Image (cartoon, rainbow, N blue to C red):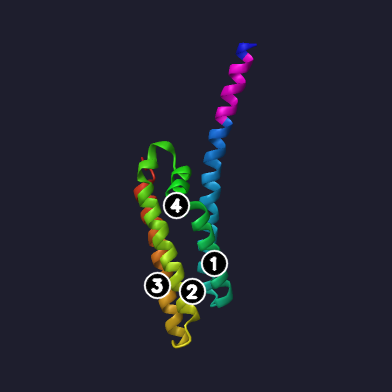
Amino acid sequence: MIKKTLIGLFVCVGLSSSLVAGDIKAEMNQLAGTVTSLEMGFFTNDKKATLEAVALLKKHIKDYLGDEASVKKTLPEHLQYKSSIALNSAEMIEKYADEIEATLNAKNMKMINRQMSSQKAFLEIENQCFRCHNLVRDWK
């Protein structure tokens, strides 16, 4: 009986830790998909799609990386001390997402200038993603 209980306990612990890892992967996959949608909005010169993608990106950033507790929950225990790096990158991504929205909605700029300025902000979003991944992930 004790043996079955211990085995059940180990299985539950294993499943819960793999679910946490799965959540992290799912969250990062959603963020990556949203960044890809944003990029496609730029490639197709679809302002509406671009603005929808940037709004979704801001929502995902707030949901997954919006505060230190969320960031720590997302990171494996041995990397939680790097949460301030991830939080900083999330704040910068939000800043550049706001810049994209403001620039694309600016009425006093030519469309070509709006596109180029907002695309530059998009590249900064990608830089923040890479920065966080390079500094926070435990590459071997």
Secondary structure under tag 4 reads loop
Secondary structure under tag 3 reads helix
| Amino acid type, label 4 | Asp
Marks 2 and 3 sit apart, C-alpha to C-alpha, by 13 Å
* 1 and 2 marks in contact (CB < 8 Å): yes
Q: Position of residue 38 (x, y in %)?
A: 52, 67
On residue 67, which mark appears? 4
What range is drawn magenta here?
4-14
Q: Nearer the viewer, mark 1 or mark 3?
A: 1
Mark 2 or mark 4: whose residue is earlier in sequence:
4
> How busy is the neighbourhood of tag 3: few (under 14 within 10 Å), some, or many (20 plus)?
some
On residue 55, which mark appears? 1
* 1 and 3 marks in contact (CB < 8 Å): no
Q: Which residue is mark 3?
A: 120
The N terminus - image quarter: top right
Secondary structure under tag 2 reads helix
Q: Nearer the viewer, mark 2 or mark 4?
A: 4
| Amino acid type, label 2 | Glu
**Residue 46 is at least partly visible in this image:** no
| Amino acid type, label 3 | Lys
The C terminus - image quarter: top left
Q: Position of residue 110 (x, y in %)?
A: 45, 88
* 3 and 4 marks in contact (CB < 8 Å): no
Marks 3 and 4 sit apart, C-alpha to C-alpha, by 26 Å
On residue 83, which mark appears? none
Q: Which residue is mark 2?
A: 101
Mark 1 or mark 4: whose residue is earlier in sequence:
1
Marks 2 and 4 sit apart, C-alpha to C-alpha, by 22 Å
> How busy is the neighbourhood of tag 2: few (under 14 within 10 Å), some, or many (20 plus)?
some
Marks 1 and 4 sit apart, C-alpha to C-alpha, by 18 Å
| Amino acid type, label 1 | Ala
Which residue: 38% across, 61% down? 127
